[in-house]
Image: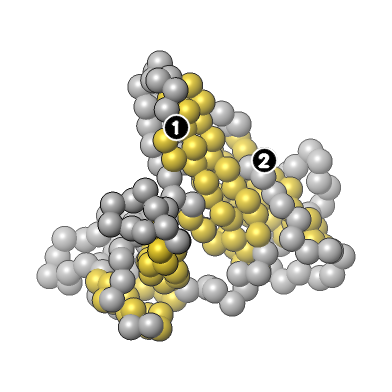
Amino acid sequence: MNCNRRANDVTATGALSPATLPPAGGTATASLGVTSSTPLVSGTVISAQVTETFGLATGQTASEEQRTEDIVLYRTPSANLPNLANPALSAFFAVTPSRTYQTGTLATGSVHLDILAGRESVRGQIGGDQAVAIDAGGGVTLTVPAQALPRNTVVRVQPAMLSGFLPGATPNTVRPQWELPAVPLRRSDAGSARLSGGRRRGPSG
């Protein structure tokens, strides 16, 4: 996990446990601590740019589209990091590779997180168990009906830059995307989430 310093008075430090996972997959727990020369409010939102790269035994490289995940920082509990004493705010979250491989087919794999500031105004809206509709502008509207998810979660709509190698995409194509957590949609008369005027990316967590 790469924690980048993005402000003159704010520093982020993180660690993963375990630091490595088998090719068959798994989940590591990330601990993140933030220090600042100015007071920070519990509940501050930052973001992580997630990049996944997999080096195959054949010599080929597989990767996922870079995505952005919000991280909420709290005053307690405090992250216990060997190279950072008494962080002002902390966060704990799961890191799970999106791909799995059989033993012997994967040479190297990396889930890279760049920690960024400046997401305080992008908190999304609550929906899933209760209905929510998000007008993202530009003719893009996300509608999540009531009871579409087992529980409420934060839902947001944001633009995404697609790589040129994707089918039907030209280089530097910007498409709207929406994100939901990795929880199953309920199969009921309530239906499921709908994105009007855009391209669906979820579910993801």
Is residue 79 visible to the viewer in this orientation of the structure? Answer: no
Res. 20 image quadrant: top right
- Name the residue beneath numbered marker 1: 61
Counting from the top left corner in percent of width and height, residue 171 is at: 42, 58
Q: CA distance from mark 1 to mark 2?
A: 26 Å
Q: Amino acid at mark 2?
A: Ala
Nearer to me, 48 or 88: 48
Q: Position of residue 178 (x, y in %)?
A: 37, 66
**Picture coordinates of residue 52, whole percent (x, y):** 49, 41
Picture disc at residue 15: 2
Estimate the x, y position of residue 43 in percent, counting from the top left: 63, 69
Task: Residue type at mark 1: give it.
Answer: Thr
User: At 44% from the left edge and 50% from the top edge, which residue is drawn?
Assistant: 65
**Secondary-structure class at tag 1:** strand
Give left or right: position of 101 versus 75: left
Which residue reaches farthest front? 170
